[in-house]
Amino acid sequence: MADRYTLVSIEDLPSHLVLEILTTGRLSAIDLVCLELTSKTFGGSHGLYPHKFKSMVDFAAFQLCVSHGVYNGMGWNAQKELFDRCGGNWKRVLRFLQTVEESSSMVKTSAGNMQITTGRYHTLLISNSSVYSCGSSLCGVLGHGPETTQCVAFNRINFPYLGRVVQVSASHNHAAFVMESGKVFTCGDNSSSCCGHQDTSRPIFRPRLVEAFKGVPCKQVAAGLNFTVFLTRQGHVYSCGTNTHGQLGHGDTLDRPTPKIIEALEGVGSVVQIAAGPSYVLAVTDNGTVYSFGSGSNFCLGHGEQHNEFLPRAIQTFRRKGIHVVRVSAGDEHAVALDSSGFVYTWGKGYCGALGHGDEIDKTLPEPLNSLKSHLAVQVCARKRKTFVLVDGGRVYGFGWMGFGSLGFPDRRVSDKVMRPRILDSLRAYRVSQISTGLYHTVAVTSQGQIFGFGDNERAQLGHDTLRGCLEPTEIFVPELADDTDVASE
C-alpha cells in the first residue's frame, strides 16, 4: 500500500497557512526569532500584511501581542510606550509580555517547564509538571509524610492521583499547588485553617485536595504567613485562614476555616495576579489597578499610612499617574511592582536599602526605581529586607540586606548592605528565567534549566549534600527529573 503521508517542506506551504501556524499562540517570541533566522519563507511581505512590518514573523508577533490579555488591557499610550521601549520590535514586545506572564508561574526552559519557589527553610521546584522539595519542616510543608522532616536533596512529592502541577506557592509552614485541571492541593500546618480544610487538629503531611474548589478551577495560589489566597480562572479571589489584620479582605477580622470569595473584588474587573505578604495581600486587575488589604505595617499597602485595610483598596498613586501595573511582589516589610513598560516601583520599609533608592528611608507611597529606568524589567521579587529584579535578556539585579549571602554577592561583610540595584556578576554567563528568594536563601532557574542557589543552607534549603551555605550562586544538583510522559493527565 502506498504511503498516504507525504513530507512537505514549510517553504512549500501557502503563505497564509504559514502565517496561521505562526499565530496559533503555541510559539514563543524566541521560537519566532529562530524561525526567522532559518528560512527566507518568514521574510518578505507575501502581500499578506502592510509594508510597515519587516517580515512575516514580525507581523505574526504583532498579531500575538494584540491578542495577548495584558496588551489588550493597556491603554494606547501605554502600548506605544512599551513598543518604543522595545525599540520598535514586535518580537521583543511579545517576549516581554510572555516573560512577565511566566514570572508568577512556570517558565519555559530547554529542560522543560519549570517553576522555583522558596519558603522559610525549604524550596519547591516544579519540573515538567512534577513537584520536588528540599529543606526542613516539622509540619508537613515538604509534602513527603510525617516521617520526613528534612530532605538534603530535591525529592519528588507524590499526590493522591497523577496530575500535572502548574503553579506552587510556599510560606513559612504551608504550601499550595495548582493542577492543570484547576484543582488545588495544600499541605503543612493547618492549625490556622490556612490550608482550607476543616481538620485543624494536626498537620497535613501530604498534599490534600481542597474540596471547596470542586467545579471552580483555579490558576494561582499565594501563601501568606497563616493564610492563603486563591485566584480562579474567572478572575475571582478567595481566601482562608487567620484574619487578624483583615488580610482575608472580607471587611472584618473573623478567621475563615475554608476558602470564601472576596466579594469586594467582584466589581472591580478580573484579577490577573495575586501576591501575599506575611499579613497583607496585593491583587492586580486586568486594567492595571493594584488593590491592597490587610496589615498596614511598614506602609506595605502603599496608601501613605499604616492603617489596616479590611477591604481591598486601590493604590491611588498608580491610578492617578496612569500607570498600568502587570505584576507585584509582596515582601515581609516592603513591596515591589512592575508596570507595562518594564519600569519598577518600590514602597514600604527601606531598612538595609531594600527599596533600592540609595537610602534607608521608608517610602509611604510607590516610587519609581530610577536607577533601573534604562532596563526593561520582566520580574520583581521581594522578601525579607531584599529585592531582586530580572531584566529582559536574563540579567539579575539585587539590593538590600546581604545577610547569609542570600543576595548573591561574594564580597559580603557582616554589616554589608546594597543600597542601589547591583548586577549579579556571577550569573552574567547565564540567561536567568526566574528567581525566588526566601528568608535567608535564594534560588534561580536559567533558560537552560539549570538551578542555582545561594545563601544559608543550614536546613538543607539549597538542596546540597553539605549543609554549608553559599555566598554566591552555586549550581544545585537535582536527581533525575520526571519526564512529561511519566505523568498522566487528570
Image (cartoon, helix red, strand yellow):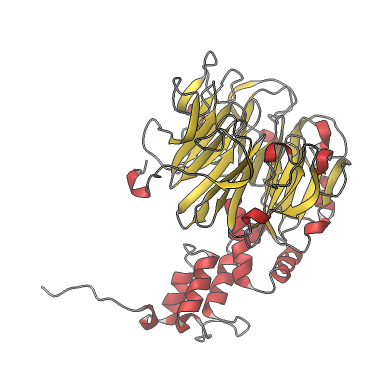
Measured from the top left, where is residue 66 in percent x and y? 60, 66
Name the residue: 82% across, 43% down: 353
Residue nearer the viewer, 206 or 388 = 388
Measured from the top left, where is residue 14 in percent x and y? 40, 81
Furthest toward the top, the residue is 201
Can you say whether 351 is above or below 84 in the image? above
Measured from the top left, where is residue 414 in percent x and y? 77, 36
Measured from the top left, where is residue 83 in percent x and y? 69, 69
Judged left or right of residue 218, residue 73 is right
Q: Quadrant of residue 386?
A: top right
Q: Quadrant of residue 52?
A: bottom right
Q: How many marks?
A: 0
Name the residue: 57% across, 29% down: 459
Is residue 232 at least partly visible in the picture? no
Name the residue: 67% across, 34% down: 439
Can you say whether 97 is above or below 348 in the image? below
Judged left or right of residue 485, residue 385 is right
Judged left or right of residue 206, residue 30 is right
Is residue 41 at least partly visible in the picture? yes
Residue nearer the viewer, 377 or 273 = 377
